[in-house]
């Protein structure tokens, strides 16, 4: 359950992330031997050695990493924003575009002039051989679902940075802090975090009317089910940072441990009666029709009035589910028109 609800990290990402600006990134081109070199801002000879503790072990990083590999979500984007284009990243087919990459990663790396990272299978079937062949200096996985068994294999390949507490439970700003420390740029963490907060705040300032509306961010795992993401979950944080207010009822639902969400069951759909807007996602058109055909679901006031924000593009759903230096600027301009439509429907409903 935690893998499904946390960011959609795998099939969903939509669990898995809020969009048409591309962050101007500074990153050096890869060196002749294929090593991803960090930009001048990435060099910090006084920052090493560095120890990064996690729930699975401590990564001892003795020198500036040149070859970075990432697992889970968000680590690749943050590394790129810090000037370190990874040599390898976990493949995320559900949210990728026709290039085979998540579009904001593809755009940022191409813009930097670096070589696109090699993609490998992650999740529950990590391709350890592929990672070994990449000869990483560090493996970044602070927002992932790697197990202790996975970690014990990975740490023998290179120092591995896992999550500080539970799988898929690292806050977005904490993830940036961890990665910046591992890459020898601890002072850059606050810069990236502040920039993201400003981007969201600037967008919110263009939509003062959003403050008048409450919302709940819901999901389902099949017919008859209903779940609600809690206020600290990343996709909810993104929406609330754009100016809307989380429906107070969300705080009354008991959280499913380690998921930042609560499975309340479709029989409790009426408890969302005061949510002006509903945010959600669907795995595909078939699933959408199946879910929307349920009378209890259709009776939710926001659903009935059409005040629903449900991105249909997998890349958008992924980006609007994870907060990092690349997804936020990519998704904002794509998000606002959808929210505008839902707000109008709520006002007219």
Image (tube, rainbow, N blue to C red):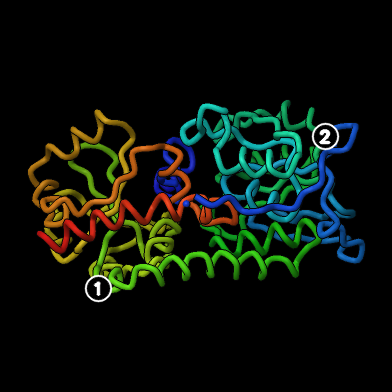
- Label located before the other in sequence (1 or 2): 2
Which residue is pictured at 48% across the width and 43% down the height? 9
Q: Secondary structure at mark 1?
A: helix
Question: Residue sitting at 88 percent across and 37 percent down?
Answer: 31
Tell how many labels. 2
Which of discs 1 and 2 lies nearer the camera? The answer is 1
50 over 89 or under it: above or below: below
Can the viewer see residue 18? no
Q: Quadrant of residue 222?
A: top left
Residue hosting label 2: 135
* Relative side of 146 to 306, left or right: right
Q: Label 1, label 2: how many angstroms apart (C-alpha)?
A: 52 Å
In the drawing, does residue 279 fall left or right of residue 184?
A: left
Residue situated in front as seen by the camera: 36 or 257:
36
Q: Which residue is mark 1?
A: 212
- Residue 124 pos. (x, y %): 55, 33
């Amino acid at each position: 359950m935690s893998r499904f609800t946390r960011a959609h990290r795998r099939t969903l990402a939509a669990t898995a992330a809020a969009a048409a600006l591309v962050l101007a990134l500074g990153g050096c081109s890869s060196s002749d031997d294929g090593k991803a070199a960090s930009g001048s801002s990435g060099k910090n000879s006084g920052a090493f050695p560095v120890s990064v503790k996690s729930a699975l072990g401590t990564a001892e990083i003795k020198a500036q990493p040149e070859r970075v590999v990432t697992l889970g979500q968000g680590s690749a984007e943050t590394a790129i924003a810090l000037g370190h284009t990874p040599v390898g990243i976990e493949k995320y087919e559900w949210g990728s575009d026709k290039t085979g990459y998540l579009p904001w990663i593809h755009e940022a790396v191409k813009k930097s002039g670096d070589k696109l990272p090699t993609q490998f299978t992650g999740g529950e079937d990590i391709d350890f051989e592929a990672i070994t062949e990449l000869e990483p200096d560090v493996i970044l996985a602070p927002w992932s679902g790697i197990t202790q068994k996975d970690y014990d294999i990975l740490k023998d390949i290179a120092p591995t940075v896992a999550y500080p507490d539970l799988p898929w439970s690292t806050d977005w700003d904490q993830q940036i802090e961890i990665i910046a420390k591992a890459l020898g740029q601890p002072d850059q963490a606050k810069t990236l975090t502040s920039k993201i907060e400003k981007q969201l705040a600037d967008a919110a300032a263009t939509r003062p009317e959003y403050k008048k509306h409450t919302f709940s961010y819901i999901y389902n795992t099949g017919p008859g089910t209903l779940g609600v993401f809690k206020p600290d979950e990343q996709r909810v944080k993104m929406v609330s940072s754009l100016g809307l207010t989380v429906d107070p009822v969300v705080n009354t639902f008991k959280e499913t441990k380690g998921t930042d969400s609560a499975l309340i069951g479709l029989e409790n759909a009426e408890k969302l009666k005061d949510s002006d807007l509903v945010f959600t996602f669907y795995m595909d058109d078939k699933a959408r029709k199946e879910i929307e055909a349920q009378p209890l679901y259709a009776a939710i006031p926001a659903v009935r009035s059409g005040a629903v924000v449900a991105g249909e593009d997998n890349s958008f759903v992924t980006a609007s589910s994870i907060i990092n230096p690349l997804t936020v600027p990519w998704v904002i301009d794509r998000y606002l028109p959808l929210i505008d439509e839902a707000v109008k429907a709520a006002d007219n409903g």
